């Protein structure tokens, strides 16, 4: 009987580790995305200068980039926290699935995506 229980326990812990690595990949992707958004601000400023407009500040792009970078870092820490909590729950036999954190990540992603879409619409209209 112990031989059958150990593989299930190992599978649970390996799944927990894969989930943590997915949080890390997502966090890194959001950080890189934030950096790209910040660089977009520089490109927009140079475009305005080439068109003969007065140099503008970086505007919202830099703030969107900073928010994305900070969010990516928070995602990695949230993933680490979830990994450690799940590991302890698996060891004690009292696993509880994630709740509010998943909802929070989904809501923030939707709000941030809509804000970026609105900003890109605003930029496109101001370039006319």
Image (tube, grey):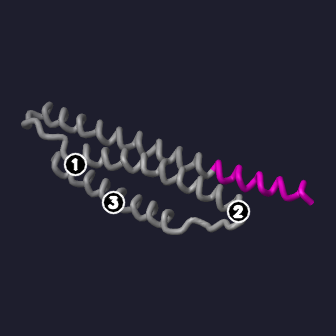
Q: Which residue is mark 1?
A: 60
Disc 3 to disc 2, C-alpha distance: 41 Å
Q: Position of residue 124 (x, y in %)?
A: 22, 49
Residue nearer the viewer, 69 or 114:
69
Q: Residue at x 25, y 53 (%)?
A: 119
Q: Residue at x 72, y 65 (%)?
A: 93
Give the mark toward the camera: 3 or 2: 2
Q: Residue at x 46, y 51 (%)?
A: 75
Highlighted magenta segment, given as a residue range? 1-18
Q: Tag 3, which secondary structure?
A: helix
Disc 1 to disc 2: CB gap under 8 Å: no
Q: Tag 1, which secondary structure?
A: helix
Q: Which residue is mark 3?
A: 114
Disc 3 to disc 1, C-alpha distance: 14 Å
Residue nearer the viewer, 31 or 43:
31
Q: Is residue 27 magenta?
A: no
Magenta-colored segment: predominant secondary structure: helix
């Amino acid at each position: 009987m112990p031989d059958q229980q150990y593989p299930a326990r190992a599978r649970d812990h390996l799944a927990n580790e894969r989930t943590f690595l997915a949080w890390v990949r997502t966090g890194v992707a959001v950080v890189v995305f934030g950096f790209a958004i910040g660089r977009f601000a520089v490109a927009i400023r140079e475009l305005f200068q080439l068109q003969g407009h007065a140099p503008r500040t970086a505007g919202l792009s830099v703030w969107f980039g900073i928010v994305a970078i900070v969010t990516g870092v928070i995602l990695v820490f949230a993933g680490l926290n979830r990994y450690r909590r799940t590991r302890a729950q698996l060891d004690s036999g009292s696993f509880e699935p994630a709740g509010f954190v998943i909802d929070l990540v989904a809501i923030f992603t939707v709000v941030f995506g809509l804000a970026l879409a609105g900003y890109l619409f605003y930029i496109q209209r101001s370039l006319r």
